[in-house]
Amino acid sequence: MRVPELSTLSIDVTNHIAKVALNRPGKANSMNAAMWDELEVCFKWLDSEPEVRVVILYGEGKHFCAGIDLAMFGDLANTDAAEAARRAEMLRQKILSLQGNLSAIEQCRKPVLAAIHYTCIGGGIDMIACCDMRYCTADAYFSIKEIDIGMTADVGTLQRLPYIIGDGQMRELAYTGRTVAADEALSLGLVNQVYQDREQMLAAVTEIASNIAAKSPLAVRGTKEMLLYSRDHSVQDSLNYMATWNAGMLSMSDVFATAEATAKGDVPGYDD
Amino acid sequence: MRVPELSTLSIDVTNHIAKVALNRPGKANSMNAAMWDELEVCFKWLDSEPEVRVVILYGEGKHFCAGIDLAMFGDLANTDAAEAARRAEMLRQKILSLQGNLSAIEQCRKPVLAAIHYTCIGGGIDMIACCDMRYCTADAYFSIKEIDIGMTADVGTLQRLPYIIGDGQMRELAYTGRTVAADEALSLGLVNQVYQDREQMLAAVTEIASNIAAKSPLAVRGTKEMLLYSRDHSVQDSLNYMATWNAGMLSMSDVFATAEATAKGDVPGYDD
Amino acid sequence: MRVPELSTLSIDVTNHIAKVALNRPGKANSMNAAMWDELEVCFKWLDSEPEVRVVILYGEGKHFCAGIDLAMFGDLANTDAAEAARRAEMLRQKILSLQGNLSAIEQCRKPVLAAIHYTCIGGGIDMIACCDMRYCTADAYFSIKEIDIGMTADVGTLQRLPYIIGDGQMRELAYTGRTVAADEALSLGLVNQVYQDREQMLAAVTEIASNIAAKSPLAVRGTKEMLLYSRDHSVQDSLNYMATWNAGMLSMSDVFATAEATAKGDVPGYDD
Amino acid sequence: MRVPELSTLSIDVTNHIAKVALNRPGKANSMNAAMWDELEVCFKWLDSEPEVRVVILYGEGKHFCAGIDLAMFGDLANTDAAEAARRAEMLRQKILSLQGNLSAIEQCRKPVLAAIHYTCIGGGIDMIACCDMRYCTADAYFSIKEIDIGMTADVGTLQRLPYIIGDGQMRELAYTGRTVAADEALSLGLVNQVYQDREQMLAAVTEIASNIAAKSPLAVRGTKEMLLYSRDHSVQDSLNYMATWNAGMLSMSDVFATAEATAKGDVPGYDD
Amino acid sequence: MRVPELSTLSIDVTNHIAKVALNRPGKANSMNAAMWDELEVCFKWLDSEPEVRVVILYGEGKHFCAGIDLAMFGDLANTDAAEAARRAEMLRQKILSLQGNLSAIEQCRKPVLAAIHYTCIGGGIDMIACCDMRYCTADAYFSIKEIDIGMTADVGTLQRLPYIIGDGQMRELAYTGRTVAADEALSLGLVNQVYQDREQMLAAVTEIASNIAAKSPLAVRGTKEMLLYSRDHSVQDSLNYMATWNAGMLSMSDVFATAEATAKGDVPGYDD
Amino acid sequence: MRVPELSTLSIDVTNHIAKVALNRPGKANSMNAAMWDELEVCFKWLDSEPEVRVVILYGEGKHFCAGIDLAMFGDLANTDAAEAARRAEMLRQKILSLQGNLSAIEQCRKPVLAAIHYTCIGGGIDMIACCDMRYCTADAYFSIKEIDIGMTADVGTLQRLPYIIGDGQMRELAYTGRTVAADEALSLGLVNQVYQDREQMLAAVTEIASNIAAKSPLAVRGTKEMLLYSRDHSVQDSLNYMATWNAGMLSMSDVFATAEATAKGDVPGYDD
């Protein structure tokens, strides 16, 4: 296993759990051009590395993530194309590219658990909306900040968050950009659990991750694929896809290994 | 700006906020033929009037809305067509037309905030399900009343409410028509907030509306379009649509105006 | 009315309410091959029997349902086909068949209320996800157990539950298989209400069922069809389908019977 | 029956057949702002007028239709909005409006037969793609002209024509704008039949229209609705929609009237 | 192998080819209640019988199929339900059931080749639209006859035929019910080939069937599933489904058997 | 412009036209692992290189393309995974990757014209189904060869070809793998034109390409995007997408440049 070396993210893999830290603490982990690209590199690697079964995404320093680095807007505004329609096409290509950077988190076949402390705003929301589950500290706060800088959020929040929180609050948060504290985040379903502080949170989330890492990795990957597929298809289509999937990918050897281990009072061990 | 004069609705526009009142207080704001038509006229106007950036929908008198005026059923039953299949076709056209009246609320590109006091039943639920957010008083109560008059609700409740409240309670409310009080409405996500009384509610909702009216109107309209689009499409399709939208409609001038104003400690001002 | 006689289910129909009991108490109501088949037989019969207007599904004995009878995996593993790809095709056909067994619950045109006590795990979750509403006792507990036996759940949980509970918790439950107690089930929206014990629950659920049985059965069936349709289609498509449905199936005679009865202070009576 | 008086279209209704002529012969029937609006007015009226059972759309003068009047581009370019993103939003609204003008042809519940002579280019193709069938004279020629004026065709050709002609030729015609003569149009399936000249064509198309006008109008309207629905939905969805439609709108009285008339050697007569 | 004995269909299985004959020659093979039911029984059996790899559907007697037996309309009209809306619901259930009878042809996993001579009208068109390919004699003629008896065709023609023939002619045939002769059927793509007479056709179609029966049956079944899936889904979805399918159901043993046989100049033999 | 150097493809760009040759003439241009990867590299580069406006794909040597190099099956069969379900997952990933290689042709925003001579079978069909148009020589022949090696075609033919040729013949070709000669390919719509020999074909296709290269490149790219989008979405969705697209990407400067040039009798010149 050769862990990629990245300038804005740090990666540690222990006991099948990859811990990925946003690592620009001096810049409140704001997302600059390098971080956007490296998120894609990182999660494509996590997807392909058999050793990794589950991922924790967290932040170094005081903030989880302050959103997009505003310096990036300069790039968006300055293009070589002199003509408006051609500039529009280039901007579309650029947005598609940024969306693709974050979609790599969702397309990683292993569950991704976001562990969020203090600030999580703007692009940070787009990012955690791509994760499987979200956990936070008592001092965490969230804001769909894009509306406050005069733009329609365009890299995932408006597309994915409505599946996570209710429609009524979703719209209020998107139109007003108002701040949501940890407790409200919990009651909205935005996070699964609130912990006292960052240390406690990381310990608890690591325990959940360990639990997942002990399951059949193939079954876990299948579960993620099915949940993503179900979100975007009818129940009938999803059932058919499920049957076709398990036709080849239901591992009888995992099922029997579990049965045998359980019978012996043992913990089953699985191949990656 | 020429505000339309309507017999069943009153409209006031101040500081970019349109306040639309259901205005048949003597009839508990029940929805007669005129009101159905005027809702469409009103919201098409609100959509097209640049001055308007956000809308509040509330009720005059004791009740928010007692639902469809039962006198309308007479019209549905009496038609010139002597033959059953032709009557069925005419009824289909009539229902499509009523649906279109309410869909104008959803298709209005500006956020619509429903401020609900006391009674909100039957057609009133269909109506608020078309709004972006819902707020109510402590004495408000809700009921999907259609089932109690022997019919399947057909102008939006069964189509839109499942995106707002959970599936399990949705079905119970639809099958039983039972009354939901303000507190339960809040915990179901049917409303975003409960206020002590009508006056307090209108003040609070006006403040939320003011907050929205101060954002870039173009970004707010884009946000509404994206949330509606996402509801009905896959995440992949929604991301692509978003990129195509912002290619032309991301206003760099709004983004830079915000940046500049913020830098000066100023409030940014936007064109409509 | 000729009630089918089944070996794993018992059926009682009184006052338009069918009570269906999982009836393998000695085996914790685990689902063996007979039960899978009989669930389909039973719910197709309930769908077609005019006398039945609403269904309660509950369990005899100590447990509601311990999930699939593990003996069934033997059948899945042993097939006559010597070749891997042909075994895969046979497994796909088998899974489609089991899915069809449970889908009969959803396709039954009458509302199905699950009354759950104590154990509800694995296949039991797939089963209650096909029901319209879920109610439970204070000692009930739930677990998406499939992940613990090394498999991706394939007969409905991953396809239907995301419409019932929020996305974030859905994934945690599916990846970890952790146990959810009654109170959490309520706050997640997995159940609509928690009752002290089985007796109290059955009484309360019977009352809800009686309430539904007193409505126009045709309107209730239409409501179920619309909610299922809306789940899988865009709002625009759902509105059009609704209008087309009510064109023929809005019963003016039910509406007028209700009006007349209400005017007299009477309870309306409906044809099946 | 009060036929609308329009400046750019003439309408004649005889024997249940409406003949609508594009009537700007001095301008090669190019589509100016008035014509776009009047097409919508006209086809909404044709939809609602019970007397009308089938429509023929043809052109007065030398040409069927020379496409959009280029003067309209001036309007598109000049807007009050000073800012690029706001101009883009206005342009989007304008295009949606032009699309709606033509979609009225498709949404008219009665079959629309286009009878095309000589020139049919640009917007003329968008228009005939909304019709049910197309017939032409031997001297007719067709061109997706938009590409030749530097734009992507945006009012229906690229959306509807691929259902009418094969994908391979569709793309060639769209990318090159090359001219298609009558014979090739026939072999591509763009037209159903080629006639010697305009007079012969109008006579033949009128005969086809008479044939349709003699059928049960309700069954014809149902047929059009089903064909449009099938184009945009899966076969399974379309079958279900069909069953729901005919539940109310299969006219047994029309079926029996036909049987009776046929038995007597008579021609059946239907209500509108 | 136990071939089902049916009153309206005859079945012969030789060399992996099942020949199914419509067998009411005295009634022009019109489809009575028994035939509708038996078509479903027959094709479900053909689907499940491993011996069968391909099916030929043809007619005994003078006609291929004269469509629905008009006596069935009596049943549709007479129901016990006194009330219009309930009659509508019963009619919907009836139509869904008839659709299901024919859909069994499409859902049979083995290719079905229709061999058509002389008359094929009304329900006969619905039936052949469910088949994979269609072949006919020079004297064959086709008509979407439903419009001539005052009804909208409701068991498959309007849903499936548009994928087989071009949109423009599809609509003309559906609105007018006009007769299509063999040559036009060929040029429309309605049939793949025209043969001189019934004998020659049956010989030629049997040869095509033999060709198919000699391929890997698993690969043929996969091909049919993919073509049906592609018809109803986006290309992106279809590619993903294909990959998931072949993950389990690509038979390396068939591929290697072919390679080996080919190397030896042999004909490969496959398991069913 | 830096043209990529590839081992299995050669690329020449002249006058905005890129000519890409399959360049393994000694192996009948069969697709080995390198060629699959390089097709993706090549078409991603063509997509991004502004100089390129249109692409011609043709073959060096005697054959256009003999399909997948059978040596690749060895890789598919041999994997490190010992367990069947894990091998299935790896195979799924491999197929998705091969599909992605070819989808790069479709996703290239510039039109791709396939010029086919002599052999085009198996993977060659998958490849040309990704192109915009297809042209061939009189001696060309086509075969969906996969069925003859015991497999279901899985990299695009079954997903894309049904949009190009009629359903009835599509299925016959897929089930039988029979050879289609140039003339039949033309009448099926598989190719747009047949030319006498390779030289004549390349000259003619280059002329079509030159014609396209002279149009506004932005309008051409928009046209391709719309045709792809329309294939996979409803007409209503496609119209809305079109309007949103042109809001930003309708180039008024291209339209006016065309008008001006035309007025002067000039050929308009466009930016890339």
Image (spheres, coloured by chain):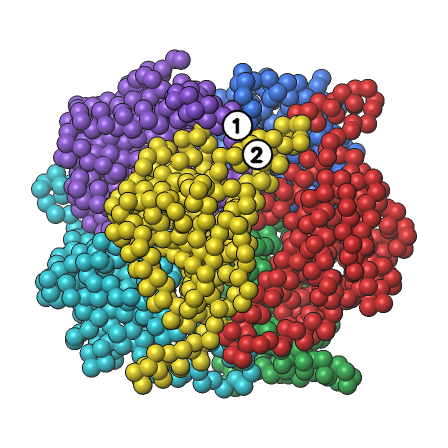
Chain colours: A red, B green, C blue, D cyan, E purple, F yellow
Provide the residue designation for mark 2.
F76
User: Residue at left 67%, top 66%?
Assistant: A174
Question: Could you say which quadrant of the image residue E200 lies in?
Answer: top left
Type of amino acid under label 1 = Met
Q: Quadrant of the C terminus of chain A?
A: top right
The residue sitting at the front extreme is: F26
As helix, strand or loop, the secondary structure at mark 1 comes to helix
1 and 2 marks in contact (CB < 8 Å): yes
Instruction: Tell me if B205 is positioned left or right of E157 in this view.
Output: right
Q: Position of residue E57 (x, y in %)?
A: 28, 27
Q: Position of residue C158 (x, y in %)?
A: 63, 39
Please state the chain letter of the residue tagged with numbered disc 1 in the rendered image: E
Which residue is nearer to you in this view: E165 or F223? F223
Which residue is nearer to you in this view: A163 or A118? A118
User: Residue at left 68%, top 35%?
Assistant: A218
The label on residue E252 is: 1
Type of amino acid under label 2 = Leu
User: Residue at left 55%, top 48%?
Assistant: F37
Can residue F198 be seen here? The reply is yes
Q: Quadrant of the N terminus of chain A?
A: top right
Which residue is nearer to you in this view: F209 or A256? F209
Q: Relative to B99, does residue C172 appear above or below in the rendering?
A: above
As helix, strand or loop, the secondary structure at mark 2 comes to helix
Q: Position of residue F230 (x, y in %)?
A: 42, 57
Q: What whole-number distance in Å separates the C-alpha atoms at marks 1 and 2?
A: 9 Å
Q: Relative to C30, does residue E179 appear above or below in the rendering?
A: below
